[in-house]
Amino acid sequence: MAQTLTLYDEYDIIYQAMKISPDDELKIAFLEALAEFEDNECHRTRKFSKTRLHKVKGVKQAIYRADIDKVSGWRIHVQYINGQIHLKDIIEGQRHDDVIEVIKSKKARYE
């Protein structure tokens, strides 16, 4: 049986994603991204084929960015805290290029 990691959603990112996603395909892609985050094998091998999880450069904190859908530009920001994954933000497609500005605008969320 596959081991899973704990996912924390203290900012209601899952609810927000379901509310603001423009279509069902994006909602399904979001849920698939969450499933990949919870899969311990992806973390063990550091291979995230769906989300392309990678560290955000240009900020002090260890913030990671993942694709929900590469073409549309929708992204998720996460942080690892005490071996757990914390959802920090969902970024709409038109805002994904301003990653540093998005993080600065909500800096209280990021430790």
Image: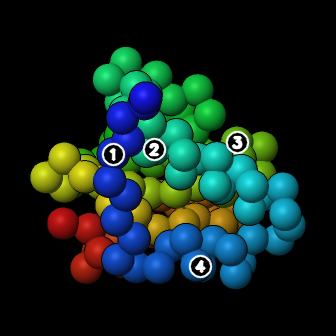
The residue at which mark 4 appears reads as 16
Q: Say what secondary structure mark 3 lies in.
A: loop
The alpha-carbon separation of the residues under discs 3 and 4 comes to 19 Å
Q: Position of residue 107 (x, y in %)?
A: 29, 74
Front disc: 2 or 4: 2
In the rendered structure, the answer to whether residue 12 lies left or right of residue 56 reads right
Mark 3 packing: few (<14 Cα in 10 Å), some, or many (20+)? few
Question: Which is nearer the N-term, disc 2 or disc 1?
Answer: 1
Q: Seen in the image, is 41 located left or right of residue 24?
A: left
Type of residue at label 2?
A: Phe
Work out whether residue 12 or residue 41 is closer to the camera in this orientation and state it. 41
Residue density around tag 1, few if under 14, some if 14–19, many if 20 or more, within 10 Å: some
Name the residue tied to disc 3: 70
Q: Kindly identify the residue that appears in the image at 13 percent across and 52 percent down.
A: 82
Tag 4, which secondary structure? helix
User: What's the CA distance linking mark 2 and mark 4?
Assistant: 18 Å
Q: Amino acid at mark 1?
A: Leu
User: Which badge, 1 or 3, is on the more N-terminal residue?
Assistant: 1
Does residue 1 show up? yes
Q: Any mark on residue 37, and which?
A: 2
**Label 2's element?**
helix
Q: Position of residue 33 (x, y in %)?
A: 58, 47
In the rendered image, which residue does mark 1 sit on?
A: 5
Instruction: Looking at the image, tell me whether mark 3 or mark 4 is earlier in sequence order.
Output: 4
Q: Give the vertical position of 87 relative to 108 (above or below).
A: above
Q: Quadrant of the C terminus?
A: bottom left
State which tag comes first along the sequence, 4 or 1.
Answer: 1
Disc 3 vs disc 4: which is toward the camera? 4
Residue sitting nearer the eye, 29 or 65? 29
Q: CA distance from mark 4 to mark 1?
A: 22 Å
Q: Residue 8: percent from the left, percent from the top?
A: 34, 65
